[in-house]
Amino acid sequence: MAAENHCDFPVPPIGGLGLGGPGGPCRRCSSAPPPGTVPGKWVRLNVGGTCFLTTRQTLCRDPKSFLFRLCQADPDLDSDKDETGAYLIDRDPTYFGPVLNYLRHGKLVINKDLAEEGVLEEAEFYNITSLIKLVKDKIRERDSKISQVPVKHVYRVLQCQEEELTQMVSTMSDGWKFEQLVSIGSSYNYGNEDQAEFLCVVSKELHNTPYGTTSEPSEKAKILQERGSRM
C-alpha cells in the first residue's frame, strides 16, 4: 500500500482560507516552486553557432541588459533554443567573448586583432550600459593618440622662368601649396630677351597610411617632381 502524501510541517488552519490542518500545505511547501521549475546555476548560449557556458549570476550582472531578461524568461522576449537547450542568439561569437568576459570579471579585455567598434556593437545590442561607456572611452583614447602623431611635410624647390609661373600654378594640386617665391634675377640668352627666373618653394603634408604603404604620386605630382629635378 502506497504511503500517503503528507507534510512533515503542518500549520494550524487559517480562519476562512481553508489552508493548513493535517495533510494541508505548509508555509515551506507553498513557497517552493513546483518541481522542474527551479532555475539552474549554469546557462548555455548558442551565439552564431558557437556555444558558451556561463552562470546565471554572470549574465544577470546588468539588470537592464538583454541577457538579464533572457535569464528571467521575459515573456516579451522571444527566445528559441537549440536541441541541447542552449539559447539561440544570432550574433557574432568572436565579439561576444569580450562581452561575456566583462560580465565575468568587470574588466574590458580586447584582443589586438579585434576592432573596438565591433565590441561596441555587441555591447549596444546586449544593452550593457557600463560596457558601452568603457568601449567608447577606449575608442576616444585610441583616436586621440592617432591625432597627436605629428604631421610630416615634404618640401620641394622648383626653378622656373616667368612665363612658366602660370602653368605651374595651374598644375598645383593634390595637396601641394606655395610656401615662398624667390627671384633669382634673369637669364640672358644670345638673341633672346632676358627671362626673369624664380625659385618656387612648395610643400605637402604626408599622412600615415594603413600598414605603412604609400600611395603612388598622381600625374600632376610627377610634373612637380620633374621640375624640381632641375635643381
Image (tube, grey):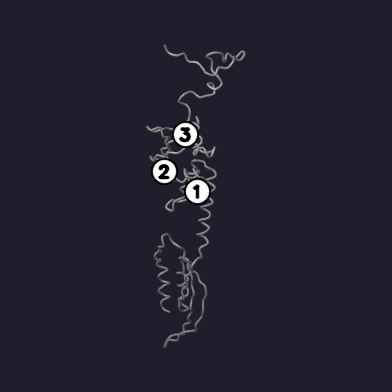
Quadrant for the C terminus, please: bottom left
**What residue is disc 1 on?**
108
Tell whether 83 sits left or right of 21. Answer: left
Camera-near label (1 vs 2) is 1
Q: Which mark is residue 93?
A: 2
Q: Label 2 amino acid?
A: Pro
**Mark with earlier residue (3, 1):** 3
154 or 226: nearer the viewer: 154
Closer to the N terminus: mark 1 or mark 2? 2
Q: How many C-alpha atoms fall within 10 Å of the one at disc 2: few (<14), some, or many (≥20)?
A: some
**Residue 85 in which image quadrant:** top left
Amino acid carrying mark 1 in the image: Leu
Residue 28 occupies quadrant: top right
Read off the residue under disc 3. Answer: 41
Q: Residue at x 48, y 36 (%)?
A: 56
Using the image, determine if residue 42 lies above or below residue 156.
above
Q: Quadrant of the N terminus?
A: top left
